[in-house]
Amino acid sequence: MKPKTAKKKSTRTSKENLPGPDVHGLRELPGLTVEGYSLQLRDKDGFVGDQASQTAFRELLERWRKRSRKNNGKDPLGGQHSRDLSKRELDLALQEKKEFDAGYVMHAAVSEFSEELASVIQRFLRQPSWHNVQRIVVGGGFPESHVGERAVLQTGAILEDLGVHVQLGRLSHNVDDGGLIGWVHLAPREMLKGHDAILAVDIGGTNVRCGIVKTRHRKARDFSLAKVVRREKWRHADDEPNRSNMVEHIADMLEDMVRYSERKKIRLAPFIGIGCPGLIRPDGSIARGAQNLPGDWESHAFHLPSALWRRMPMIGSGPTLVLMHNDAVVQGLSELPFMRDVQHWGVLTIGTGLGNASFTNRR
């Protein structure tokens, strides 16, 4: 008789214990359709969106500084590489007025970046999911600076000159909050009843943000007054964690939020929303687009909602529901109450990469 062989253990993370519906990356919401997100258009230079990211701007700036060194014998921004300069340093440099100084170099880089961003927007508007988009909200870390704000304004002017009549605007919320607040429109309504707030996570290529989002407000049932009452930001790019370390750190941040809620008597719903770069499958795995995160987040053996649920299976007296969606979609949804005057709209998040999503309002 042949001896019994042990069954090979699956490397796929089991999701059987996750409570609630196995529905991540929803496209159809009450009164809204997510037409598309995480577009990855290519040209001869690679992904089109990479030409209009914060990373791309700093590369452009570095090229303009090299030209200045060649022509004038000095670098007006000093010895640090452009990628290491803080937003405050860049904003101060933009204000300088002398010819061939830091301000000259900054304005040149901003102008060239604006042309690139305008070109990317034109490419997006030719895609079926972006047809008829009337307004684009620009979020991410870049527009929160004076440099980024000027670039967005110049981009709008360039598009208008080209006959592309689309409105460009900035997020109504603090840039650190948009990717958290959007979850109030994705959390199941029945889970919000009898609770004050939810937990949300926004994962980017440089930072992770975690927060408590207050959902209850008597005067705004459309969540237009939803706000983040506590937040924590971790610049993981400085620590260079591997994938497992990063997941554990996110779980620690969430547990800290739960303890804070207990101290402040905030009634948390048993819900965690995760915004993450990439195309999110209905089962909560990532199909593509997570290349800026450390390690392989697209592996079939990795399932972030399950990993966080195992650390926090219960919140309060209820089983935790952990849902995941694309970070640009979530950031866009934070603007939903302010987009009722247009039918088709989109969002661009300018950070380490360029996130994107488009929406259609339904009556």
Image (cartoon, rainbow, N blue to C red):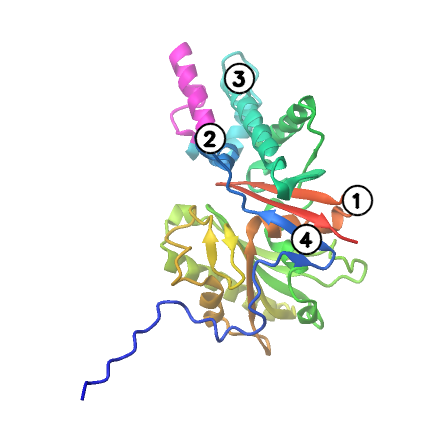
Query: Where is mark 3, residue-wise?
Result: 104
Earlier sequence position, callout 2 versus callout 4:
4
Q: What residue range appears in magenta? A: 59-82
Query: Where is mark 1, residue-wise?
Result: 341
Please state which of the two labelled residues, at mark 1 or mark 3, is closer to the viewer: 1
- Characterize the magenta stretch by its predominant secondary structure: helix
In the rendered structure, the answer to whether residue 236 lies left or right of residue 111 reads left
Quarter of the image for residue 260 reads: bottom right
**Picture layout, residue 179 above or below residue 316:** above
Identify the mark at residue 351; answer none if there is no mark.
none
**Do labels 3 and 2 touch, CB within 8 Å?**
no
How crowded is the residue under tag 4: few (<14 C-alpha within 10 Å), some, or many (20+)? Answer: some
Earlier sequence position, callout 3 versus callout 4:
4
Query: Where is mark 2, residue-wise?
Result: 58
- The image position of residue 109, as x and y in percent, is 51, 23
State the CA–CA distance, disc 3 to disc 2. Answer: 15 Å
Query: Where is mark 4, residue-wise?
Result: 33
**Do labels 2 and 4 touch, CB within 8 Å?**
no
Earlier sequence position, callout 4 versus callout 1:
4
Residue 319 is covered by the magenta coloring: no
Of residue 164 and residue 3, the one placed in the foreground of this image is: 3
In what element is the residue under mark 3?
Answer: helix
**Do labels 4 and 1 touch, CB within 8 Å?**
no
Residue shown at 59% from the left, 75% from the top? 316
In what element is the residue under mark 2?
Answer: helix
State the CA–CA distance, disc 2 to disc 4. Answer: 35 Å
How crowded is the residue under tag 3: few (<14 C-alpha within 10 Å), some, or many (20+)? Answer: many
